[in-house]
Amino acid sequence: MTDLAWQADLTFLVDMTQHLNDLNLKLQGKHQLVCQLANHISAFRTKLQLFRQQAASGNFVHFPTFQSRLQTSQDIDTKVYVTKLDILVQSFNSRFYDFDQCRLLIKLFADPFSVSVDDLSAEYQLELTDLQVSDELRATYRENTLLHFYRTLPDTFANLEDNALVHTSMIGSTYCYEQAFSQMKLNKSNTRNQLTDDNLEAILHLSTSNIKLDISKLMDDMQHHPSH
């Protein structure tokens, strides 16, 4: 590989890595729902298709570093980068194939009032029909968070509630597991080999809990030793 080709590859990689980093930041966070993550992934896959189409015509406007390199040299074969984008598109399509398979149920969870009853299996059709004609439930959906909406949903919508439970816990539980594992590795080390399992469990509970401790109140409630 010539120096020119190596420098072109490097600048293209810098720009592509920035796009991937932006996606990574959007996917982070403890309280995101699977529908939000699916939207981020879907948007990025659409962007990849745009990048690929523009690259095929020699347009790299969304790769500013690489575009600058192209302006200083006419000997760079841009077709190589169309191929690289094709590989990345195929990789994303393969990795997120499961999202495509359950996209309708994710949409049912995220926006049940916009889903066509005919597109769903029989177990959801009658419940969704009752839901979509209810002005009261529609108002609850619009005026509150998605989780609050499902918490207040009547018991007659059991299948819709089950679908919501599946998609509510799909990502959040994974994040908690990863957070707990990271905390365990941080605390259970060679330099802290005297740490008992009970103390480790208490540390993990505190590290992964949303409860805010009121240290001042806890100290005030403690029984202090009288002076001798």
Image: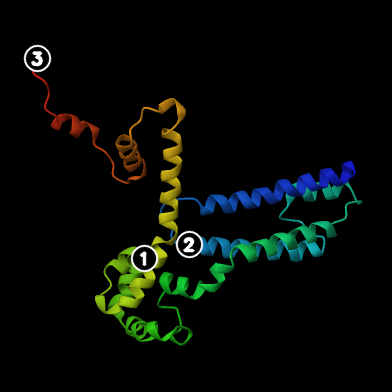
Residue 215 falls left or right of residue 72: left
Q: Give how far apart the Cα atoms at labels 2 and 1 are.
A: 11 Å
Find out whether the residues at labels 1 and 3 contact each other: C-beta distance under 8 Å.
Answer: no
Instruction: Answer with mark 2 or mark 1, whichever residue precedes in sequence.
Output: 2
Neighbourhood count class around disc 1 (C-alpha, 10 Å): few under 14, some 14–19, many 20 upward:
some
Residue 29's place in the image compared with 207, above or below, is below
Camera sees residue 170 = yes
Which residue type carries mark 3? Ser
x%, y% of residue 167?
42, 66
Q: Is residue 156 left or right of residue 69?
A: left
> In the rendered image, which residue does mark 1 sit on?
146
Q: Is residue 212 above or below residue 45?
A: above
SS for tag 3? loop
Residue 93: name its quadrant: bottom right
Q: Tell me if residue 79 comes above or below residue 190 in the rendering.
A: below
Sequence-wise first label, 3 or 2 = 2
Secondary structure, mark 1, is helix
Q: Quadrant of the N terminus?
A: top right
Frontmost of labels 1 and 3 is: 3
121 left or right of 63 in image = left
Farthest top residue in view: 228
Q: CA distance from mark 1 to mark 3?
A: 55 Å
Q: Which residue is mark 3?
A: 227
Q: Amino acid at mark 1?
A: Leu
Residue sitting nearer the eye, 92 or 21: 92
Residue drawn at point x = 50 percent, y = 51 percent: 28
**What is the spatial separation of the Cα atoms under label 3 and label 2, in whole angstroms?**
58 Å
Labelled disc at residue 36: 2
Which quarter of the figure is the C terminus placed in? top left
Image label count: 3
